[in-house]
Amino acid sequence: MTRSDILIIGASAAGVTAALTARYHYPNKSITVIRKEKLVPIPCGIPYTFGVVGTPEKNLIPADDMFKKNNISSQIGEAVSIDREAKIVTLSDNESLEFDRLIIATGSIPVIPPLPGIEKQNIFAIQKDVPYLQDIINALEKAHHLCIVGCGFIGVEIAEECKKRRPDIKISIVEMLTHCLQLVYDEEFCLKAEATLKDQDINLLLDEKVVSFEGNDMVNGVKLGSGKMLDADMVILGIGASANTSIAASAGLDIGPTKGIQVNRYMQTSDRSIYACGDCAEKVSFFDGKPTALKLASIATMEARVAGANLFSTNRVNMGVIGVFSTVLGDCAFAAAGLTRTQAIEKGYDVVVGESEAMNRHPGCMPGANMLKVKLLFEAGSQILIGGQVTGAKSGGELINTVSACIHQRMTADEIATFQTGTHPALTASPISYQLVNAAEMAIGKMKLK
Amino acid sequence: MTRSDILIIGASAAGVTAALTARYHYPNKSITVIRKEKLVPIPCGIPYTFGVVGTPEKNLIPADDMFKKNNISSQIGEAVSIDREAKIVTLSDNESLEFDRLIIATGSIPVIPPLPGIEKQNIFAIQKDVPYLQDIINALEKAHHLCIVGCGFIGVEIAEECKKRRPDIKISIVEMLTHCLQLVYDEEFCLKAEATLKDQDINLLLDEKVVSFEGNDMVNGVKLGSGKMLDADMVILGIGASANTSIAASAGLDIGPTKGIQVNRYMQTSDRSIYACGDCAEKVSFFDGKPTALKLASIATMEARVAGANLFSTNRVNMGVIGVFSTVLGDCAFAAAGLTRTQAIEKGYDVVVGESEAMNRHPGCMPGANMLKVKLLFEAGSQILIGGQVTGAKSGGELINTVSACIHQRMTADEIATFQTGTHPALTASPISYQLVNAAEMAIGKMKLK
């Protein structure tokens, strides 16, 4: 039986980052990572394998390289049980691995709705599995009508990428909510995203539910709540994922209110020698400490950096989930951090909004100039930043991280309005027009009027 | 005689931003801006008028538009004196303007070294003046050998842009210091910048002083300290600027140790009804409160936002200058915030460095992928961030502003290492490889070894 000081189950974003962090913090400890498959896709890159990236083999986490460079052992196998008393993990081939500290990073599994016809062929969920993803691409090459269920990030990104690979295919997206990406952006950003999708001839069916999948062995249609019937010889489900907690639950570890493995601020489970991080772990909001079911690779890696550092001494605290998102639709970046207006109001905040839009170059005739808009949401009394959204130029993908830093540090509108930015004609808006700073100033104006 | 509640002298970055900020904070006050010329160039855009932008007329601050939209009056004229007792500014045409609060935003004037031959024709400093800039371009169209004195931002940017307009021209840059951009970047970044310039056939003469300018009426050569003689039928000086304080000094306002108008944290001069901001104002370092002669449009606008908000009640404090810089050389962004290693050591810091380099897309085969490197400098004991440098992809131009936010908030390496970032295949590095977070983690590793 092999023994490792540190054993990690899972080698996606959380597992790999936990292993690397453990190595940086504990140079002399032995570390082993257990992974089901040799090839692990980059989770956020999966939609792009259907389009610009081309194949799942070009979208892999370079885990072997990283492990080799950092003296981390790795083992292919499926962990099936944890003996907490003996501190042993058993694999499906009955091999046993002993540990001193264990990190569970088993990720999530896509939600499969229990609808009539769900078992038919050519209905796919997004599994993080290379041969399965290749099957989707093979089906895509032959399909005529693709129906995507769910208009969140996975849905919209897959729609665009499938259109890039197969410009002739008909694509519909069915979404229960009123807007695409509604859980992450305020309405005007959602409307802009919807217009971008429609421009690409992607058919949006909003406020619509799937009732059943029709056909014989193969799916050939999707029946909607409104009574409409969609032609569809291929279906992709993008309606979210649930924490993969089976091994943790079997071992008797506590499960939290959103069905993740319950962890404390140090990412310890109810067994203090066992940590959990990533999609499988229960999360709380940065804003009010309440449970949240948000799942993101960037949250997973943050949690992994907390878990990995804390294994033998509690150095780091998880402050709770801010939620920082970004994507590109058409040529336009859409990014968000923290609470949307709707979420903030639901949480009882009195919200003041400031907005600013300007070219991301100066003067505006500089090459590469594009509009970039920043919207900031503040709590009215304290003036503390609680959310931000960015749309336009691709540099917005980094700008949202400045917004995240400001949220993380609970900066006020005044502090952001006098914040020192670097600006350059070929890189950003002018110092007079810098959007982040001006959006804060615009919010202050409204707070004075209140 | 016109009377304004708020009178502002100067309409470059500081003056315009002060006027706008005053308007946001004091909606009912009358505001007048005095400017020497109708057309005011965007200061950081000036080098680009010589190349990609083409003419100075395409690089103007849209002051008239901004003033009109915000009910700000503007007057063309040169302010020549301030009567502090009577609260009156007099213009060169003897017109008088009465004020309740005055903001001096008279900027800076380029340093002209008192060297033999400096008066010869075709030797130019960079004046923020449209006809003068057009004269430089006219001279550039005919020149064969351009010598640029000073290898700071202005020098390197002008060299590249002149080469774009006139690929056949020979360009040399003469610099007293050992490296180009040495006051802003650590050595390895300077070396990379120098290699980029050499690739464009720009001749760098480092550790070299100009002794005299040769020729008859027209310059035809530059004599160097080493005895070398450079052919040069055109010279551009880029060796810095000094605060334009003449009107303030004549009015008896205090002048500070670096020859700027002395101001307090609220941007008030020694006369509490008179404020100063931008290049004309004295500055202190964010890090130790000591005087600094740094001059940047982005510092000017920050100071203007403090001054404009504080005119009738002190709402805001200037925290001191961090210094956030960026530029593009070749296709590569170079950005920096806070202290370089040399500056930090000079200030007595025990410095620990962390570095991380990764593609700014994931997987690396995504369109638009470029390397992006982040270097962070921490104070060893407190683990507080004191500086950062970024080079590579143009998204680094926004990433440096996240670094600036982290410096501003005195974040520790641990806080940055667990900081929540937004990542996306088409916009940033992967969450596992995100450079800012990993650079902090690398520094922590070194601090543990100390």
Image (tube, coloured by chain):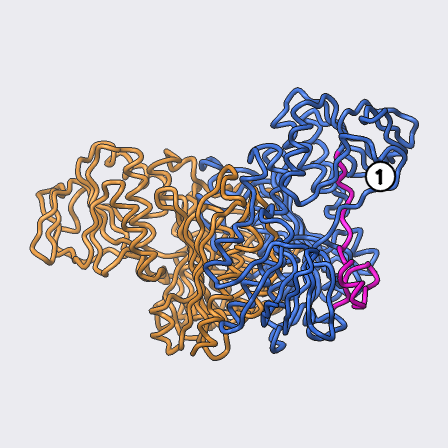
Chain colours: A blue, B orange
In the picture shown, does residue B418 fall above or below B47? below
* Visible residue check, residue A281: yes
Q: Is residue A310 left or right of residue B61?
A: right
Q: Is residue A207 left or right of residue B267?
A: right
Quadrant (top left, top right, bottom left, bottom right) of the C terminus of chain B: bottom left
In the picture shown, does residue B76 fall above or below A318? above
Look at label 1 and name its amino acid: Met
* Most foreground residue, A74 or B98: A74
Q: Is residue B136 magenta?
A: no
Q: Is residue A308 left or right of residue A365?
A: right
Prevailing secondary structure class for the magenta stretch in the rendered image? loop
Q: Name the spot of residue A403 as percent of width and height, x first.
A: 61, 56
* Most foreground residue, A109 or B377: A109
In the picture shown, does residue A428 fall above or below A405? above
**Mark 1 belongs to which subunit?**
A
Which residue corresponds to the image point at 62% horizontal and 73% vertical from the top-left? A311
Which residue corresponds to the image point at 63% horizontal and 35% vertical from the top-left? A134
Residue on which the image places disc 1: A176
- Secondary structure beneath label 1: loop
* Most foreground residue, B281 or B175: B175
Circle 1: is it few (<14), some (14-19), or many (20+) Cα within 10 Å?
A: some
Q: Is residue A251 magenta?
A: yes
Counting the numbered discs, the total is: 1
- Which region is colored magenta? A236-263
Which residue corresponds to the image point at 61% horizontal and 68% vertical from the top-left? A1
Q: Name the spot of residue B190 as percent of width and height, x first.
A: 31, 56
Q: Quadrant of residue B342?
A: bottom left
